[in-house]
Amino acid sequence: MKRGVLIVLSGPSGVGKGTVRKALFEETDIDFQYSISMTTRNPREGEMNGEDYFFVTREEFEKNIAEGNMLEYAEYVGNYYGTPKTFIDDTLASGRDVFLEIEVQGALQVKEKMPEGAYIFLTPPDLDALKERLVGRGTEDMDVIDKRVNTAASEIRMMANYDYAVVNDEVENAVQRIKDIVKVERLRVNRVLPEYIAMIEEIDK
Ligand SMILES: Nc1nc2c(ncn2[C@@H]2O[C@H](COP(=O)(O)OP(=O)(O)O)[C@@H](O)[C@H]2O)c(=O)[nH]1
Ligand SMILES: Nc1ncnc2c1ncn2[C@@H]1O[C@H](COP(=O)(O)OP(=O)(O)O)[C@@H](O)[C@H]1O
């Protein structure tokens, strides 16, 4: 059976990953399964357990790491964030596309394990715009914002390790660029896979 495409959207905090992802999921012509991450950070106002994140204690998170349940995890500005493994494996195996929205260290860990995915780095037009977005969102204190902006400077250097870079100037533009990338990835998978299967069948004869 055809495997789903793994789409990984990453980039610095405040660049607009969540905003772009939500806009993308509102498009009617896409059908991605969103991977809900696990985190030890506190829920923000309006966030729901099991919808935005699985909110857990540090002990619970460390137990999941020890039991090998995480595809990847990272410690980011004092909290753990990670991707539960089973959902990804099962969903891809069932032929559906999976969408991950994670920070840079985690995305690069996934790339090591699953290089066949489409790795997209969402970048701000510039660092001033990034800081303005974090301040404008108003969900973190100034010292956390400064830490996130400092982290962003080193994250942006990792852009070269991705397959695609998308500038989030306007949300609609970023959404369209990601849709175009997924079209290309589907073509790539659908072109390579039948040839590969034919080759295996030939060898098996
Ligand atoms: N490695 C990793 N990073 C994640 C995961 N889930 C979310 N993140 C990232 O962790 C960072 C902090 O997330 P959060 O506190 O929700 O802030 P926000 O994404 O800036 O709104 C962001 O860059 C997220 O994309 C995950 O499962 N694994
Ligand atoms: N293209 C854009 N132009 C201007 N502001 C944006 C854009 N994309 C997102 N934002 C704003 O920037 C802030 C951070 O966006 P968010 O999606 O929470 O980022 P992330 O998930 O990457 O941390 C939010 O207040 C959001 O409304």
Image (tube, rainbow, N blue to C red):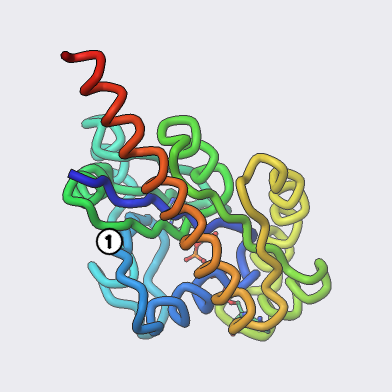
Crowd around label 1: few <14 · some 14–19 · many ≥20 (10 Å): some
Q: Which residue is mark 1?
A: 54
* Front residue of this view, candidates 25 and 71: 25
Residue 94 in percent (x, y) is at 17, 50
Q: Quadrant of residue 198?
A: top left
Residue 56 in percent (x, y) is at 28, 56
Inspect the image, locate mark 1, and give the three-letter code of the amino acid beneath it: Phe
Considering the numbered disc 1 on the image, is that residue within a helix, a strand or a loop?
Answer: strand
Q: Which quarter of the figure is the C terminus placed in?
A: top left
Q: Quadrant of residue 169?
A: bottom right
Residue 60 in percent (x, y) is at 25, 46
Say above or below: 110 vs 11: above
Say above or below: 139 vs 150: below
Q: Ligand 2 is located in which of the four quadrants?
A: bottom right
Q: Is mark 1 within 8 Å of ligand 1?
A: no
- Residue at 28%, 63% (x, y): give it: 33
- Residue at 54%, 39% (x, y): give it: 108
Residue 129 in percent (x, y) is at 78, 76
- Residue at 38%, 59% (x, y): give it: 99
Count of marks overlaid on the render: 1
* Front residue of this view, candidates 193 and 31: 193
Q: Quadrant of residue 199?
A: top left
